[in-house]
Image (tube, helix red, strand yellow):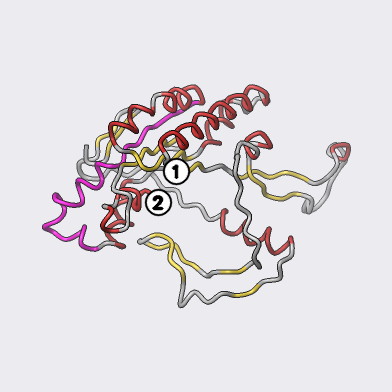
Amino acid sequence: MAVQACLPVEEGGLGGCVVYIDTEAAFSPKRLVEILTKRYPRYAEAGNVHSLLQPFTQRVTVYRVDSTTDLMSRLDSLEETIIENNVKLIVVDSIASVARKDFDDGGVMRRQAQLAAQASTLKRLAENFNIPVLVSNQVTTTSQRPYYEFDRPHFGADKSLYVTAALGYVWAHAVNTRISPLAPVRSYPYAIDASGINLLGDAEEADLTASQENATALIGNFWERKITGRQHTAPGFRMDAQHHNLFG
C-alpha cells in the first residue's frame, strides 16, 4: 500500500507521501525498495536510481514511537505534516504493541481510554483529509472455558484455546462503518515473494463450504501471515531516535 500511495498518478498511484508510524522497530526500507523495483523494474535501472528511486523513497517518512504517550503525541501533530507533504496514507504498525507493553500490568481501563483517544484522532484525520489509515493489531490466545474452571488441573492440549485479535471490544467497536460482503467463502492461492503478495496461477476460485468453521479458518490463515524484518539501513537512509526519512 505504501508503494501504491507513492507512485505517480499516471502509473496508477496516488502521487503522494506516506507517514509510517513504527512501534515495533520492524520497518524495513530494504523491503520497500525491493517491492518497488520488482514490480516496477525501471526504478532499478542504473540511470534511474537518482532520478526515480531516490525521489520515490523520500516520500516515505517513518516515525519511531516507543510508548502510548509518544504515539498520541505524534498523532496529534500529524495535521501539519499531512498538509505540507501531501500525505495520502497513514500506517500505524502496530497499534497494539505499545498498548500491550505499557498496560501489561492490568490497567485495562487506562488502556481502553488511550485506545479510544487514538482511534478518535485517526478517524478524524482520515475524514478531514480524505485519506486511508491502515492500522495493524496483534493476535492473542484466549480460552472458551468458563472462568470458574481456570483453577482446575488440566492435562494435555487445551482444545478450548483459540487465536483472536488483541485489544478487546473497545478497539473492535472503534470502527464506524463495516463492510460485510454477502458472498460464498472462496479461496485464492497466493505467495509472498520479493514483489509482495501475488496470486498463484490463473487464480481460479475454489468454492468452500460457507460454514463458520471454514470462514474462521480462512480469515485466520490469511491474517496470521505477517511479514516482519530487522531494521535495514539502505544507502542514504537517515535515522534518529524519533524520525527518519528514506534517502534523507
126 or 97: which is nearer to us?
A: 126
On screen, 66 above or below 7?
A: above
In the rendered structure, find residue 132 and report the number of the disc placed on it: 1
Q: Identify residue for label 2.
A: 1
- Dot 1 alpha-carbon crowd within 10 angstroms: few under 14, some 14 to 19, many 20 or more: some
Q: Residue at x 53, y 35 (%)?
A: 97
Quarter of the view holding residue 130? top left
User: Viewer-nearest of labels 2 and 1?
Assistant: 1
On screen, 191 above or below 97?
A: below
- Type of amino acid under label 2: Met
User: Percent position (x, y) of residue 66?
Assistant: 46, 28
Quarter of the view holding residue 102? top right
181 or 60: which is nearer to us?
A: 181
Drawn side of residue 48 relative to residue 2, left or right: left
- Can the viewer see residue 67? yes
In the rendered image, which quarter contains the C terminus? top left
User: Percent position (x, y) of residue 133?
Assistant: 46, 41
Residue ranking furthest to the left: 47
Q: Residue at x 35, y 49 (%)?
A: 5
- Can the viewer see residue 31? no
Please tell me whether residue 42 belongs to the stretch shown in magenta: yes
Please tell me whether residue 119 belongs to the stretch shown in magenta: no
User: Percent position (x, y) of residue 146?
Assistant: 86, 41
On screen, 179 above or below 78?
A: below
User: Percent position (x, y) of residue 220?
Assistant: 63, 56
Residue stretch in magenta: 41-67
